[in-house]
Amino acid sequence: MEENTNVMPSNFIHDLIDEDLAAGVNTRVQTRFPPEPNGYLHIGHAKAICIDFATAEKYGGVCNLRFDDTNPVKEDTEYVDAILEDIKWLGFQWENIYYASDYFDFLYDCALTLIKAGKAYVDDLSADEIREYRGTLTEPGKNSPYRDRSVEENLDLFRRMTAGEFPNGAKVLRAKIDMASPNLNMRDPVMYRISHVSHHRTGDKWCVYPMYDFAHPLSDARENVTYSLCSLEFENHRPLYNWFVEQIGFAAPPRQIEFARLNVNSCVTSKRKCLELVEKGIVRGWDDPRMVTLCGMRRRGYPAKAVRTFIDKVGVSKAYSIVDYGLLEACVRDELNDSAPRAMAVLEPLKVVIDNYPAGQTEIIETPKHPDHPEMGTSAVTFSRELYVEKGDFMIDPPKKYFRLYPGNEVRLKGAYFVKCVSYETDDAGNVTCVHCTYDPESRGGESPDGRKVRGTLHWVSADHSITATVNLYDRLFTDENPGNDMLEKLNPASLTVLADCRIDESFTDAHPGDVFQFMRQGYFCVDKDSTPDALVFNRTVQLNSSWKK
């Protein structure tokens, strides 16, 4: 039986669930992932996705996807579609898809129930006044002058709010709990606000919309969720979560369990900050490979399995911590080292002419696609008299311990022959334009029959059997581990370098967007979604070794 690699190891959440199951508190496990469709998911959401879906999988339970679409001002079907794609990419499958808007009628009835029970009222205070009346952590709040309206008046006003009689901000519906509670969330929180905005699913049916703290727990309860798993900032909201569920009369309220959110250095995950990067043209969109959105990481070539491995390594706890971005890169590197086929590509080409190789002759060099996976087969690369190697693989006057090409030195061409530099050409500015070599025809395969050794091995492509490609070299977007509010002052000027004249073996015309390769001696590269057979574009996923320095 194939092992389910999506299932997370035990953690404190699972320990609490085990205790509940053993005590008979629950006999089943049902979770949900409830994103708001107002932006693209990022690496922090990946942790929540893994926790919600993998917890259900571990216990043979159900995980539903529910879009928290209670704020039509910021929400769009574009984000709904992107979220669906991201979850599938990570390797998870929801049991059902729901929307908070599915429950608007139910939630409205719940609001009426609370009004009739004297536990909700319509308030005319402005948002600023409500904030002022709420008090502070050390001082209790004070009651709104509208708190003691009669049930009949509240019902009438709420229905008139629903009918569109009042403008935005004129009135809100608040829960009547305790303005002196030590928990600020319990000080008569707002349940409904007026918003004359068309909703992406319900159109203009509603002009009052429920607040998250009201809609979320009741949606959970309506769906029979047993465990509401959320990040730690909702811990202080738990009493309110339970209050709403209990007041409406659900017999078995879901258990809310909080975990520490994922904080990764050297990047930003705030939707507001990400939007600023997009709108100011600092990045090329939400899926720019420098972003830590899931679509950005996918476009860069990060394997979903590596992201899940990263989440597993970070673990699940309640303790606040910041994770080094290098750990994510290491997980990507480890996964691609095992799975990515090898290929030869020259990013900064320098022509090499093998003077004693017969003009017009070619040979097919078979190279393994992966040294540890012979089942991947081999690549057929054409060898010819004129080749390209990296500019950095030749120096006129090299330093000590430089084992690549220089006048009089011999190197191995990967899978092919020994060649020795005999001369070079330069342009008027002194730049090397061509290197001339001779080859040893007895050294095919990279070994000499006389046993002589060479210390340098170079990758190469044939000049006549390679094609031009564009390669994007991506690095971290920020120079500081904590970009913070002044992130624009910490942008890395080298976060993107575009190489437009790279040379790739002609067999790459068969590559498809999303395919990832290890370019020998260079790193891991992914075919970009905008790439075509006639205009190949590659994104550097990650270097072979970590070379990041502040």
Image (cartoon, rainbow, N blue to C red):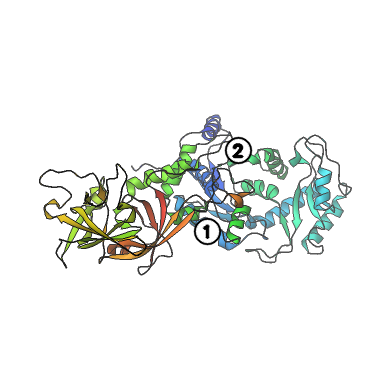
Q: Secondary structure at mark 1?
A: helix
Front residue of 146 and 434: 434
- Towards the viewer: 115 or 9: 9
Q: Is residue 259 above or below residue 200?
A: above
Mark 1, residue position: 82
Q: Is 133 drawn above or below residue 19 in the view shown?
A: below
Which residue corresponds to mark 2? 258
Image quarter where the N terminus lies is top left
- Whether residue 6 is visible to the viewer of this picture, yes or no, is no
Q: Nearer the N terminus, badge 1 or badge 2?
A: 1
Report the side of 295 relative to 104 (left or right): left
Marks 1 and 2, Cα distance to the nearest angstrom? 26 Å
Name the residue: 29% across, 42% down: 401
How many numbered circles are shown? 2
Seen from the viewer's position, the closer of residues 96 and 402 is: 402
Q: Amino acid at mark 2?
A: Glu
Q: Quadrant of residue 319?
A: top right
Kindly check if marks 1 and 2 are in contact, taking CB atoms under 8 A apart as contact: no
Residue at position x 25%, y 67% from top?
A: 464
Tell me the SS state at disc 2: strand
